[in-house]
Image (spheres, rainbow, N blue to C red):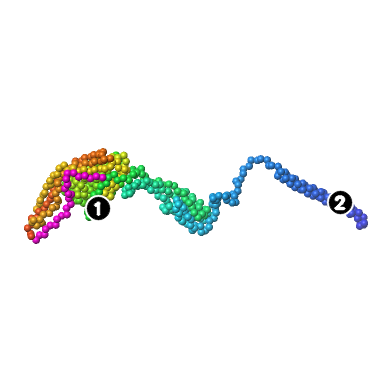
Amino acid sequence: MRPVGRHLPVIQQRGSLLIGAGSLILLVGAVFLAAYFVHVQDAAALAVQDARQARAKPAAPTKTVEAPPAAATAPPPGPASAAPPSHVRAPADMLGRTVEIEFDGKRLSRTWADLGVTLDTATGTPMVDRTRIEAALIEIKEQLDRAPLNARMDLEERKVYPEKPGFGIEVFGAVSAIEAGARGQVKRVVLEGAPTPPTFTVADLGIEDISTVLGHYETKFAIAEQARNDNLKLLASHLDGIVMQPGQEISFNKISGDRTEKEGYKVAHVIEAGEMVDGMAGGACQISTTLHGAAFFAGLDILATTPHSRPSTYVPLGFDSTVVYPVVDLKLKNPYDFPVAIRYRVARGEAEVEILGKKRPFDKVEFVREVVEQKPFETVTREDATIPVGHMVIDQPGYPGYKINRYRNIYRKGRVIKKNKWELNYRPVVEYVRMGINPDPNLPAPKPKDLHMPKPAKGTTMKMSQ
């Protein structure tokens, strides 16, 4: 067994060595740690110095792509404001709110829903249904559009009114305006428009001035004869408003057409072969005669005219003009360098014609009738057993025949500047009489017929003038 005392020096030597090694390690670690802190401090100081230098010196120019500037937080000054973003959510009750629609100085109110506005289900953004908004705009246009006015003649006032363009809502622009207004939740939307042209102008009308009556004439008729009156009005309607251009010719038969039941004409009294009978379109000759009278005093050229086979009750002898479709016609021509218009009115037992145009290029028109020859009429007597002896009935009174010269003298400044002459012939009208042969004394006497015949011409000359 080893003595304990001999090993004690060896143990102390090893401990000293271990302690010395640990101290060395600690010393080295402290050096490295100190060096680390020094390095960190130097790096920080260098970074601060670089930053100061960067601020002191301008940066070198480089090619860069600039980003767009951010939107301003406040709108610029002025009346216009920036449009709201399209994704702005509208209040839930917006569609029921009313908005004022203004166009051409007129206003009306509608709800946004009425205008076809809807809300996007995901974002709540107002948007429009194109089908519904266009249907709403059609209804709004009917109320706010200003319709164009066509040129027209007012024959009663003797005025020509020129055409005027209209002004209507422009639909596609209105859709955009309403959509923008809905997104902005405005209270009023002003719609833009565009002119709408008329369809009939003064140039189409063919006349600018109807202020002067160049000539007129009127005849009378019995208002109790309804069928004949209807014929008169129908025929006059074809002639009323006719415009004759300079040098233009018109035909009564071409304007009125075939006068048949299909065209609306009725059976009424007509003169045929010198006798008064019932016929289709009775009254046509009174319409042609009245037109002839106005044309005569207006100075129009009378290219074709034919008197009746017997004189008429509604016009002086020698001033009538009969028509029979399609062979006997009344034809007129405008001799002036300006257009003229025909105004024809049938009412209250009168047929009236006016020829309208510019100022008369003459002072007076004169009608002169000269009787050249008068021929006696024949009487035809027939026996009638229904009439008592000693009585008679005149079915048709007789009327003399005439050979007549008709003149038209057109005056200016007291001198005749134009003269026309027509030779007319009227055959004598046969008188038909029924003589009673019944001897029965109790047979009542017949009632006389209500006969209408013109009065025989008085003297050889007659004059009328306008």
**Disc 1: CA contacts within 10 A as few (<14), some (14-19) or many (>=20):** few
SS of the residue at dot 2?
helix
Q: Is residue 395 left or right of residue 304?
A: left
**Residue span colored magenta:** 442-466
Locate residue 272, reporting x and y percent: 18, 47
Where the N terminus falls, by quadrant?
bottom right
* Residue 170 inside the magenta-drawn segment: no
Q: Amino acid at mark 2?
A: Gly
Locate residue 131, reporting x and y percent: 45, 52
| Viewer-proximal residue among 256 and 178 | 256
Q: Which residue is mark 2?
A: 20
Q: Amino acid at mark 1?
A: Gly
Residue at horizontal 11%, vertical 47%? 378
Identity of the residue furthest to the front in this view = 414
Residue at horizontal 57%, vertical 50%? 77
Residue at horizontal 29%, vertical 45%? 213
Q: Which residue is mark 1?
A: 349
| Viewer-proximal residue among 466 and 449 | 466
| Viewer-proximal residue among 377 and 65 | 377
Residue 380 visible from this viewpoint: yes
